[in-house]
């Protein structure tokens, strides 16, 4: 490693420094995410909540910056819809929205899906459920045979599940934070739901654990044990070898997709997006994408959208999951009209399909990346690389100079003049060896009760007579917010730099 770097004139220590919160403190551990952040001009999380959490995680790289200004935004993931839609769903969408159905970002044409009749939608759902039942039986039979289980168990597998029963799907990596066993936390309560005479549920579970993840493997075993019990054999199926092919079959057929991560550990959780196009509904913890997608008429939320401490949250979330199933999901699924159609359920499907499918599809995501990230970076790359990277070199020189001269800058005491509706603020700023064009003088107020964070740019009013490179900066704020909330600060400014990412200099008046 050192040899490879030396060949390029780079010292290993300098690379390691890029992965530490404080580059100069060799006692700090090396962090891959910090290294990646320092090599990036733009940094995005994969859901709104992930952006928020990431700003906290990267806060050490931006000491003295308010958490809300740590330069990490978010672009919520989206799935490649044609990979996940069933033939039946694709037909309905194509008839309603045309061949271009997945190419455009969210827009009104997706709402045409709401015009599909109840009968047609419910037929599509029924076909999906039938297929998932058939697939689960086939897979289960060969899985049990392959493991040498007794013929009785194999025979029962041929009649596992029922194509008219509310079908829940749960498939993911079995790892602690995803809590794949939350549904199992009260076996009796779950048993009552599975074996209910008139309104039963059934569950298809699939998953893999990392070979070294003992807890993950143990959690898989618990599901397998439940599925083996004679009373539950027809209602619970565990499928091995969770992969994309199995995921495709599942998301096309199940009625409700369950996700129970420990908030806020799920960065996004894309599997729930895969079911949208097929008219399946989500029931999930308000974590990752569901934290921003959920509204009461598109699916169901588990828990109250809070995190920590873990044990209490686990118990609370489990109780909430059972309650939602018992009080909302099951009754709505089995509440049928004279034609045998679940009208409220179908309304929810329409809302979920029309509102969420386009929002959490790849077209929207790619559009966001192009507009908000790739074009900005491509332009910057072109500008900076021209003439043998002349602009990049100049920017680097600017950055080094400003960094070394930053200590020479200081902020005097602001003077506030009050009128009825406004407060006018004037503050002396002595720039020392720093060029006025290299900085911005601002007023900052952090979020506080009903107020959002605020940044107000101050303008240079005039030079202070007798001072060297000293100026009065001035600006006005509305009287509605206490002047105490605001602080004067100076930050680096350059029209071509990504700031504060590339140079997080900041100086506060107090
Ligand atoms: C979609 C998918 C995942 C990721 O799902 P999450 O909801 O993010 O856990 C993992 N494995 C397979 C096979 C998938 O299809």
Image (spheres, rainbow, N blue to C red):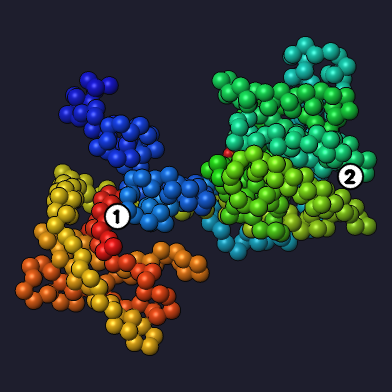
Q: Which image quadrant for residue 193? A: top right
Q: Determine the residue positioned at 31% across, 42% down.
A: 38
Residue 94 in view (yes/no): no
Q: Find residue 53 and report its horizontal and vertical position in percent.
A: 48, 48
Q: Which image quadrant for residue 486? A: bottom left
Query: Considering depth in this image, is 133 or 177 the residue closer to the camera?
Result: 177
Query: Considering depth in this image, is 432 or 367 the residue closer to the camera?
Result: 432
Q: Determine the residue positioned at 18% across, 74% down.
A: 472
Q: How crowded is mark 2: few (under 14 residues within 10 Å), some or many (20 or more)?
A: some
Disc 2 or 1, which lies upstream in sequence? Answer: 2
- Helix or strand or loop: what does disc 1 sit on? loop
Q: Which residue has dot 2 on it?
A: 199
Work out whether 331 lies above or below 474: above
Is 457 situated left or right of 262 in this image?
A: left
Ligand 1's quadrant: top right
Q: Determine the residue positioned at 82% across, 52% down.
A: 327
Q: In which quarter of the image is the N terminus?
A: top left
Is 336 situated left or right of 374 in this image?
A: right
Q: Is the residue marked 2 within 8 Å of ligand 1, measured from its CB?
A: no
Q: Which residue has dot 1 on it?
A: 499
Is 420 situated left or right of 379 in this image?
A: right
**Marks 2 and 1, Cα distance to the nearest angstrom?**
57 Å
Work out whether 211 lies above or below 308: above
Q: Residues within 10 Å of mark 1 (few under 14, many from 20)?
A: some
Residue 2 in view (yes/no): yes
Q: In which quarter of the image is the C terminus?
A: bottom left
Marks 2 and 1 close (CB-CB < 8 Å): no
Is 341 situated left or right of 185 in this image?
A: right
- Helix or strand or loop: what does disc 2 sit on? loop
Q: Find residue 394 and report its horizontal and vertical position in percent.
A: 15, 50
Q: Find residue 239 and report its horizontal and vertical position in percent.
A: 72, 27
């Amino acid at each position: 490693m050192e040899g490879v770097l030396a060949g390029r004139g780079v010292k290993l220590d300098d690379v390691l420094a890029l992965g530490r919160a404080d580059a100069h403190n060799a006692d700090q551990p090396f962090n891959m995410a910090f290294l990646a952040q320092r090599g990036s001009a733009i940094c995005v999380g994969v859901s709104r909540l992930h952006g928020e959490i990431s700003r906290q995680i990267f806060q050490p790289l931006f000491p003295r910056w308010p958490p809300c200004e740590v330069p990490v935004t978010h672009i919520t993931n989206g799935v490649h819809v044609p990979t996940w839609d069933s033939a039946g769903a694709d037909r309905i969408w194509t008839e309603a929205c045309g061949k271009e159905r997945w190419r455009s970002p969210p827009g009104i044409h997706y709402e045409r899906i709401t015009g599909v009749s109840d009968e047609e939608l419910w037929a599509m759902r029924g076909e999906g459920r039938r297929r998932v039942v058939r697939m689960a039986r086939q897979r289960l039979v060969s899985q049990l045979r392959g493991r040498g289980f007794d013929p009785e168990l194999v025979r029962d597998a041929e009649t596992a599940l029922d194509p008219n029963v509310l079908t829940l799907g749960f498939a993911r990596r079995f790892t602690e934070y995803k809590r794949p066993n939350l549904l199992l936390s009260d076996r009796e309560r779950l048993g009552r739901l599975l074996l209910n005479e008139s309104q039963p549920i059934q569950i298809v579970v699939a998953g893999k654990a990392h070979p070294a993840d003992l807890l993950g493997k143990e959690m898989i075993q618990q599901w397998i044990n439940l599925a083996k019990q004679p009373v539950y054999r027809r209602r619970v199926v565990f499928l091995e070898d969770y992969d994309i092919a199995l995921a495709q079959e599942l998301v096309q057929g199940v009625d409700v997709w369950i996700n129970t991560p420990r908030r806020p550990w799920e960065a996004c959780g894309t599997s729930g997006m895969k079911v949208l196009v097929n008219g399946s509904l989500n029931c999930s913890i308000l974590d990752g994408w569901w934290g921003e997608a959920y509204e009461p008429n598109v699916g169901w939320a588990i828990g109250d959208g809070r995190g920590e401490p873990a044990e209490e949250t686990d118990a609370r979330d489990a109780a909430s999951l059972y309650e939602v199933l018992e009080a909302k999901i099951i009754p709505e699924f089995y509440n049928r009209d004279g034609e045998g159609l679940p009208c409220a359920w179908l309304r929810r499907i329409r809302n979920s399909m029309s509102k969420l499918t386009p929002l959490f599809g790849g077209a929207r995501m790619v559009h966001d990346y192009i507009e908000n990230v790739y074009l900005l970076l491509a332009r910057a790359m072109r500008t900076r690389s021209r003439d043998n990277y002349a602009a990049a070199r100049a920017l680097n020189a600017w950055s080094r100079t400003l960094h070394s001269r930053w200590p020479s800058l200081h902020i005097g005491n602001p003077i506030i003049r009050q009128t009825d509706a406004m407060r006018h603020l004037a503050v002396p700023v002595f720039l020392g060896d720093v060029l006025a064009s290299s900085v911005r003088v601002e007023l900052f107020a952090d979020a506080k009760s009903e107020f959002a964070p605020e940044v107000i740019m101050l303008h240079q009013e005039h030079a202070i007579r007798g001072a060297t490179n000293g100026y009065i900066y001035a600006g006005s704020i509305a009287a509605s917010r206490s002047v105490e909330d605001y602080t004067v600060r100076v930050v680096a400014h350059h029209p071509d730099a990504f700031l504060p990412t590339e140079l997080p200099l900041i100086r506060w008046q107090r």
